[in-house]
Amino acid sequence: MTSLANRPTPPRSDGDGPVPGPLPPRLTRSLVGRWALFVVMVLVAVVMLYPFWVMIATSLKSEAQFLSGGGFSWLSWRNLSATLPLGQEVLSSTIVCSVSIAVILLVGLPAGFAFSKLRFRTSTTVFLIIVSAMMVPLQAILMPEFVNVTRLGLTGGYAGAIVVYASLGTPFSVFLFATYFRSVPDELIEAGIVDGLGYVGVLRRLVVPIAVPAIATVTVLQFIQIWDDLLVGLLFIQNTSERPITVGLAVLAAGRTTSIPELMAGSLVSALPAMVVYLGFQRYLVKGLTMGIDR
Amino acid sequence: MAQINLDAVTKVFGDTRVVDDLSLNVADGEFMVLVGPSGCGKTTALRMLAGLEDVTSGTISIGGQVVNNVLPKDRDVAMVFQNYALYPHMSVEKNIGFALKVRGDSKNEVKRKVADAAAILHLSEYLDRRPKALSGGQRQRVAMGRAIVRNPRAFLMDEPLSNLDAKLRVEMRLEIARIQRLLGVATVYVTHDQVEAMTMGDRVAVLRDGKLQQVDTPQRLYDHPDNEFVASFMGSPPMNLVRCQVRAGAQRVEIVVGAQTVELPWRYASSHDLPQSGGGVVVGVRPEDVTVADGSAPNTLRVRVERREALGAEILVHLSNLEADGVLAAREESALRLVAKMGPREQIAVGDEVSVRISPEHAHFFDATSGRTLRRE
């Protein structure tokens, strides 16, 4: 620890612009640090963005151009839309995603609120049981789940996949909402109650507006997970007319001859929505992880 | 507007009686302060009034109606919270008008009432702001606004000033008292600050460990405390409490402090249930009732100045008694520590040996074991 007296005195400025002379050592160090950081971030960005560049560049070539290395063509996009019902598949993915997320939010938000703000017996135990469900990987319960859903007769269309996605995503959302609401002062809820609201009113008029960052966080994370998932869609959505985009892509890749440019075009279509959602909600996402409600 | 009655109200959390057999009447329009150290049950009592806590036993009634099982929203009381609990996603205007909107008042009516409340609280120019963009004092005003706009039957305030800095606290203290008088609504105000209690309350209820110690006007609490706790809690610095022997003889009452004896007026023997001669008692003296006297005057105590705290308008002087031979009393049972409040011009320095006089008119006597006052009613 340097004492106050030992510190280098900053150059005096009389208001006539910067004072010439060497920068104080701390400033130099911080400049070097910032440049090093910048270089590292550029490298990371290249590593992250390169696959996208490959996807875009490759999708704009024909098979022959891809093998030879040069040229430009819309052929793979045309072929892709001819082989795959792209619109239908994107729609399917959207339906499965949005309904699942709606269920996850509708269950997770009130449950998280109840676990963090209402006092009831066994609340801690029940909460721990629900949260421990987060530890169970999908693969471990896939077969029994498949049997159950088949017995319920839900493996044809969207319903089965939605049930599976919602039940897999809910524990996390309960956990996230409960944690988030713990940072909301009890007095805020009590103020609402004294002001004339019941619990439902409190939930609707106070808790939901305050929880927007948490809602955004759950939405983005679940959207990315569900949109990009292949396994559940492949197993539980058996009607070809209702299959999501990831399953469509898998079909494309599983053909006897796979056209790489077409696959890249399809991958791009599949990857874009997740990126758009992420970028759109990013502002809330950061807030959701850092924001508490202070006095 | 209504009066509030608590009748033998008790609250038990686990094994702890947080509020123990509390009976209290707050008249219509009265400003009642609940004061006590932290953990004395004052906030719990307030929360039971608001309906945020169940009552274990006893009854609470507001305006003659028993409200034990009435939901908070149907009690028609407004509460101001310690951390204000403003709705962060609403503007000042919406915050103040929220309860009215929930109640179903028309838009115009809400607007008019919010404007009236904002005018009283000098908030009119901030109506569009979010709570985040307000200073502490302004947030406090919004919290008040939220309460007064409803014109409720009672105000409940839970340490509303404790988050403000000292200057603002004095300002808002006056402000809250002014608004309460203006609206004439029965108010229960919880604080741990005895200055707030003294300055704001029409009456003050002192609590300790969930039990009501005394309820009275601030001045009577100060002048006639019922027990040692009230005596030492009300007033800053607190009352000097001295364990000593009392000697009541022919037409005289004497107290023995270490090796020194002070004679007090004979009337104390008739106004107080003093113990038999030689019995122990706790004598209470307010710091302002200890004054420097001429050494040759009778009934003075020889003391040494240990510490001197100049507060500007007054000086607090910490004193220790001397034994007869001029040495400092060392033994615990005869050692006396006194705090005296003196005028700013008093020439007194640390280490001085002086004689002090205890104002004979203002001595208090408490039972040495129970701490209860020995004053006859």
Image: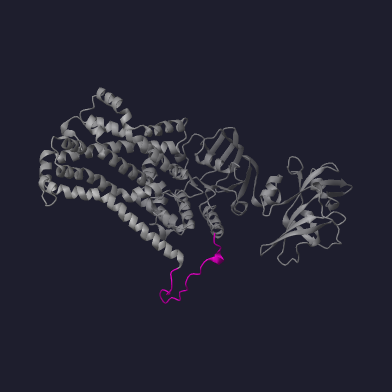
Is A9 left, or right, of A268 in this rendering?
right
Q: Would you say residue A239 is visible in this rendering?
A: yes
Q: Position of residue B263 (x, y in %)?
A: 84, 52
Q: Which residue is drawn at 33% across and 54% down?
A: A41
Q: Which residue is drawn at 16% across and 43% down?
A: A260
Q: Would you say residue A196 is visible in this rendering?
A: no
- How many numbered marks, from 0 up? 0
Instruction: Identify which residue, B229 or A181, lies in the foreground.
Output: A181
Q: Position of residue B30 (x, y in %)?
A: 57, 48
Is B40 left, or right, of B71 in this rendering?
right
Instruction: Identify which residue, B321 or A40, lies in the foreground.
Output: A40
Instruction: Please name the colour scheme applied to the rendered image.
Output: one colour
Q: Which residue is drawn at 75% across and 40% down?
A: B369
- State the predominant SS element of the stretch in magenta: loop
Q: Position of residue A150 (x, y in %)?
A: 25, 24
Queried whether the magenta region covers residue A113, the answer comes back as no
Q: Please state the extent of the stretch shown in magenta in the rendering.
A: A1-23
State whether residue B92 is above or below residue A223: below
Q: Which residue lies furthest to the front in this view?
A: A68
Instruction: Identify which residue, A122 or B57, lies in the foreground.
Output: A122
Q: Position of residue B159 (x, y in %)?
A: 54, 49
Q: From the image, which quarter does the C terminus of chain B lie in? A: top right
Q: Which residue is drawn at 40% across and 55% down?
A: B130
Is B68 left, or right, of B224 in this rendering?
left
Q: Which residue lies furthest to the right in this view?
A: B250
Instruction: Identify which residue, A1 or B160, lies in the foreground.
Output: A1
Queried whether the magenta region covers residue A11, the answer comes back as yes
